[in-house]
C-alpha cells in the first residue's frame, strides 16, 4: 500500500543566505511479527526486540537515524498482525511499495513491514489511537495444539464452562479501574474503558476478543487468566466482578502465557480529528473511588 506525500510545508531556510532544510515527512508503518524470539517491542540495549530490529534496518536502508513510536508496546512473546508505528524522516524514496520490498530483504523473517504510507504531522501512532484490538487463542483438543499453530495458540484441553466465562467477561465491560489486572508502573493510570470481551468457539479453537481504548501492562493476559479460573470452576463470575473493586494488583489473578496473544488492529479517527484525539489521550484519568465513581479525566 502506498499513498501520496502529505508534506507539512516547503523547505525552511535556517538563516538568511543559508541552505534550505527539508521538513521531515511523517510515515506510518503497518507491521506484523511473530513475538516468539523477541524480548518484546521496546528497544533494549543488547537485547533483540521488535523496535530495535526495525530501527536498525530502517536506519541502514534510509541512511539516517530512525526512531519509531508505536501504538502498543507488546511484551516478550506476544505477536502482532496489526501493529502500527510512525517515524519522521527526510529524503525518503517516493516508491513506498519498492521500499516495502527492500525492507523485506533487510528484515528477519519473523517481522514484516506490510505497508508504508505518508500521514499528517498530527498522526501519532500511540496518542492518536482510540481503540486497540487483541485476540487470545486457545486450542482445546485433547491432543494439544497442532504443530503448525503452536507458536500462537495455547493448549487448554479441559472442560470449560463457556457460559460462566462469557458472564464473567461481560461483567468487566465499561470504564473501570483495572488495577487488579495490571502490573504497576509508576505514574501510570490503571483506569481503562474495556469495550469488548467476547469468546467464540470454532471446533477445537477458542478465541477471546478483547478491545479497549488502551491497556495497561499485562492487562489482557491477566483478564484471560482470570477467565481461565472461571472456566475451570475454580472461581465464579462474581469473583471476577469483585476484582474491579481492588486498587492493587491481585495475587489471585494468573497471567496467561504470552504466546497466545496477538495485537490484531488499531483504530484511528479521521485526519481532521487527530489533533483533538492526541490532546484527549494525553490527559490522565483520575482514580476511581471505592463507590465506583471516577473523577473524569484530569
Image: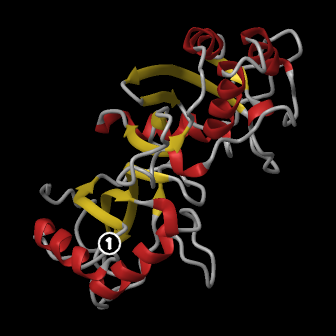
Whether residue 124 is visible, yes or no, is no
Seen at 54% across and 39% down, the residue is 279
Q: Helix, strand or loop at disc 1?
A: loop
Q: Position of residue 112 (x, y in %)?
A: 30, 65
Q: Most extreme residue toward the front, as rendered? A: 143
Left/right of residue 169 with respect to residue 52 in the rendered view: right
- Residue that appears at 78% across and 33% down: 253
Q: Position of residue 122 (x, y in %)?
A: 39, 49
Q: Quadrant of residue 296?
A: top right
Asked which quadrant contains residue 286, the reply is top right
Is any part of residue 102 visible from this angle?
A: yes
Q: Which residue is mark 1?
A: 109
The residue at the point 21 percent across, 56 percent down is 6
When the figure is inspected, residue 32 is found, relative to residue 283, above or below; the finding is below
- Work out whether residue 51 or residue 3 is closer to the camera in this orientation and state it: 51
Q: Is residue 240 left or right of residue 274?
A: right
Image quarter hosting the C terminus: top right
Amino acid at each position: 500500500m502506498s499513498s501520496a506525500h502529505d508534506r507539512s510545508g516547503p523547505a525552511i531556510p535556517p538563516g538568511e543566505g543559508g541552505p534550505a532544510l527539508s521538513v521531515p515527512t511523517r510515515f506510518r508503518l503497518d507491521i506484523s511479527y511473530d513475538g516468539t524470539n523477541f524480548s518484546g517491542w521496546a528497544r533494549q540495549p543488547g537485547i533483540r526486540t521488535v523496535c530495535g530490529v526495525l530501527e536498525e534496518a530502517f536506519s541502514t536502508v534510509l541512511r539516517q537515524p530512525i526512531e519509531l513510536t508505536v501504538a502498543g508496546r507488546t511484551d516478550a512473546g506476544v505477536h502482532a498482525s496489526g501493529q502500527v508505528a510512525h517515524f519522521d524522516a527526510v529524503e525518503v524514496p517516493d516508491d513506498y511499495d519498492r521500499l516495502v520490498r527492500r525492507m523485506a530483504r533487510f528484515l528477519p523473517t519473523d517481522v514484516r513491514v506490510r505497508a508504508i504510507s505518508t500521514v499528517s504531522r498530527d498522526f501519532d501512532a500511540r496518542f492518536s489511537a482510540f481503540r486497540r484490538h487483541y485476540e487470545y487463542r486457545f486450542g482445546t483438543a485433547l491432543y494439544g495444539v497442532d504443530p503448525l499453530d503452536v507458536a500462537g495458540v495455547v493448549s487448554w484441553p479441559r472442560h470449560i464452562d463457556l457460559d460462566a466465562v462469557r458472564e464473567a467477561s461481560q461483567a468487566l465491560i465499561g470504564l473501570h479501574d483495572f488495577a487488579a489486572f495490571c502490573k504497576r508502573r509508576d505514574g501510570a493510570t490503571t483506569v481503562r474503558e474495556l469495550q469488548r470481551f467476547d469468546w467464540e468457539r470454532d471446533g477445537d479453537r477458542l478465541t477471546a476478543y478483547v478491545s479497549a481504548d488502551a491497556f495497561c501492562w499485562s492487562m489482557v493476559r491477566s483478564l484471560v487468566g482470570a477467565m481461565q479460573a472461571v472456566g475451570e470452576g475454580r472461581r465464579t463470575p462474581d469473583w471476577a466482578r469483585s476484582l474491579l473493586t481492588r486498587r492493587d494488583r491481585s495475587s489471585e489473578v494468573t497471567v496467561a502465557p504470552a504466546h497466545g496473544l496477538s495485537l490484531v488492529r488499531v483504530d484511528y479517527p479521521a485526519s481532521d480529528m487527530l489533533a483533538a484525539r492526541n490532546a484527549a489521550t494525553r490527559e490522565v484519568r483520575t482514580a476511581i473511588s471505592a463507590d465506583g465513581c471516577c473523577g473524569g479525566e484530569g
